[in-house]
Image (cartoon, helix red, strand yellow):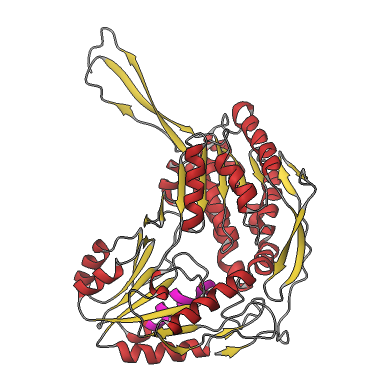
């Protein structure tokens, strides 16, 4: 592994002013009712970046009150879809105008690569807004063919006030996964960004107001899960909750929603996604794809390819090349354009990943490369590869959320289908083969919500994304995401003396 950690020579770190640190409620930035703040830290160094207003139940109550007023009496749900779409387009344009600043916020908050933020995350968020801006005036029901003299039709209505709980690994992407379709549908909302990464969400709240989104429609309340998150999940005046995060917390969200007002919940939870490489695959292509699947965003991604199955005919050659590539990976300051992998998001995550690496060694897997911290400060970990991994090992069953690749060998198609499905998760899977018959059979056999054949991370605004099994339910992106923020109402009226039915 090539380490560039701490080397600031040869690249420039942009000067960054933290402009927004307060809660955004009813169109204004305000202090928390308690007056409390919490620290957000730069994972490059562990040093404090900013002190953020700490929202809790009292603040969530105020935000929900504002959102309820905006939904019940404000212009947003009463506006034409075309008019909402125009405002969302303006919102997207404003995001584009601040790409550099927003990417820098996600870098100092989450340790994300600055170059990738500018190239992918921030423009991707703007493009999601545009996708749903285009959908906002195409929300319609159906005329029903009734079996008796009645005229029947369906209406699609916004569900009301939505609570969005956003994770820390993709602060911008996940913000717009949730906010964009809900806004297009005519909902109002309260967003709780992760306590590790609140900075860009507060900036987006500011831009939303500049774009013309009415006060109370979009509220952003940073805070902690057990306080602010629980208040959203259990709130009697929130009509829907959308949560992305761990399976354990997803259970708590669902339980609180059930015990309160039985609000519907959509959950995008953990994953342990397999990538299956068949003998006929081009070796270099396969190694590159698997490397990307395992180490993108330092492994902090729910669909990370963390279980790698390689057919026995190319297994040894694959291990050799994958190890060589991992050793060449540059770990260091995410503002450095030479760097491939930045720091884990915080000390807790850093220590969790190192714990799993230790468990892998103790359970008998072979550590081929990596496995150690690197750098003098910050939360950096070497890209890690284990071989001789067994299905029952913790590193093959539990979500690590770090730069750890677990390699396993297989013989037959039937065997690898069984192994790929031997997990409680079902978020995504990758297949690398030149054989269309194998690709078709395996893609239909794996119990997962997204299957990527000879590619990986093939996200697109039009492609619905969500899991099976304990990876959750409900879709982000695509028209499916719009549907989860809409109720379907059937309306029927009698027909008298009608010439036809």
**Of all residues shown, which one is farthest toward the front?**
362
Q: Quadrant of the C terminus?
A: top left
Q: Position of residue 202 (x, y in %)?
A: 69, 53
Of 26 and 235, the residue lying toward us: 235
Please state if 278 lies on the left or on the right of 425 as rendered: left
| Residue occupying image coordinates x 38% and y 68% | 273
Magenta-drawn segment:
287-298
> Which quadrant of the figure has residue 119?
bottom right
The residue located at (64%, 37%) in the rendering is 64
x and y, in percent, of residue 13 in the image: 73, 76
Q: Nearer the viewer, residue 115 or 329?
A: 329
Camera sees residue 224: yes
Q: Is residue 290 magenta?
A: yes
Q: Position of residue 163 (x, y in %)?
A: 57, 43
* 91 shown above or below 195: above
Asked if residue 358 is positioned above or below residue 108 in the image, the reply reads below
Considering only vertical position in the picture, is 383 above or below 460?
Answer: below
Q: Which residue: 33% across, 91% down? A: 317
Q: Which residue occupies 63% across, 80% down?
A: 337
Residue 215 can be seen, yes or no: no
Q: Report the quarter where the N terminus lies.
A: bottom right
State the count of labels. Answer: 0
Location of residue 453 with respect to 181 vertically, above or below: below
Most common secondary structure along the magenta stretch: helix
């Amino acid at each position: 592994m090539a380490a560039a950690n701490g080397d600031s020579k040869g690249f420039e770190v942009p000067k960054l002013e933290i402009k927004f640190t307060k809660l955004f409620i009813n169109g204004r930035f305000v202090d928390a009712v308690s007056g409390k703040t919490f620290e957000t830290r730069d994972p490059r160094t562990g040093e404090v970046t900013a002190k953020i207003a700490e929202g809790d139940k009292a603040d969530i109550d105020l935000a929900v009150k504002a959102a309820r007023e905006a939904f019940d009496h404000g212009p947003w749900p009463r506006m034409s879809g075309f008019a909402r779409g125009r405002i969302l387009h303006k919102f997207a344009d404003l995001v584009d105008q601040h790409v550099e600043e927003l990417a820098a916020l996600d870098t100092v908050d989450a340790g994300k690569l600055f170059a990738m933020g500018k190239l992918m995350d921030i423009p991707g968020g703007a493009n999601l807004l545009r996708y749903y801006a285009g959908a906002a005036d195409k929300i319609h029901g159906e005329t029903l063919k009734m079996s008796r003299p009645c005229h029947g039709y369906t209406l699609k209505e916004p569900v009301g006030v939505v609570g969005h709980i956003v994770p820390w690994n993709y602060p911008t992407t996940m913000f717009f996964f949730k906010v964009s379709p809900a806004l297009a549908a005519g909902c109002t909302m309260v967003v709780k960004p992760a306590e590790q990464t609140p900075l860009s969400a507060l900036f987006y709240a500011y831009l939303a107001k500049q774009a013309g989104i009415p006060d109370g429609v979009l509220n952003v309340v940073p805070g902690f899960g057990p306080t602010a998150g629980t208040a959203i999940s259990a709130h009697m005046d929130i009509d829907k909750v959308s949560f992305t995060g761990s399976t354990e917390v997803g259970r708590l969200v669902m339980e609180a929603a059930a015990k309160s007002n039985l609000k519907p919940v959509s959950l995008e939870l953990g994953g342990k996604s397999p990538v299956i490489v068949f003998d006929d695959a081009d070796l270099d292509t396969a190694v590159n794809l698997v490397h990307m699947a395992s180490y993108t965003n330092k492994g902090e991604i729910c669909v990370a390819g963390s279980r790698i199955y390689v057919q026995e005919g190319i297994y040894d050659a694959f291990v050799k090349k994958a190890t060589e590539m991992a050793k060449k990976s540059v770990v260091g300051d995410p503002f450095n354009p030479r760097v491939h992998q930045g720091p884990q998001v915080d000390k807790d995550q850093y220590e969790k990943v190192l714990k799993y690496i230790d468990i892998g060694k103790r359970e008998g897997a072979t550590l081929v490369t990596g496995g150690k911290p690197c750098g003098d400060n910050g939360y950096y970990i070497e890209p890690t590869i284990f071989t001789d991994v067994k299905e029952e090992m913790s590193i093959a069953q539990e979500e690590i959320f770090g730069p750890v690749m677990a390699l396993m060998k297989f013989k037959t198609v039937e065997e690898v289908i069984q192994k790929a499905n031997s997990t409680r998760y079902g978020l995504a899977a990758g297949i690398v083969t030149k054989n269309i018959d194998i690709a078709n059979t395996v893609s239909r056999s794996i119990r997962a919500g997204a299957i990527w054949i000879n590619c990986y991370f093939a996200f697109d605004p039009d492609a619905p994304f969500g899991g099976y099994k304990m990876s959750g339910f409900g879709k982000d992106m695509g028209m499916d995401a719009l549907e989860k923020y809409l109720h379907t109402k059937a309306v029927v009226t009698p027909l008298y003396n009608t010439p036809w039915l």
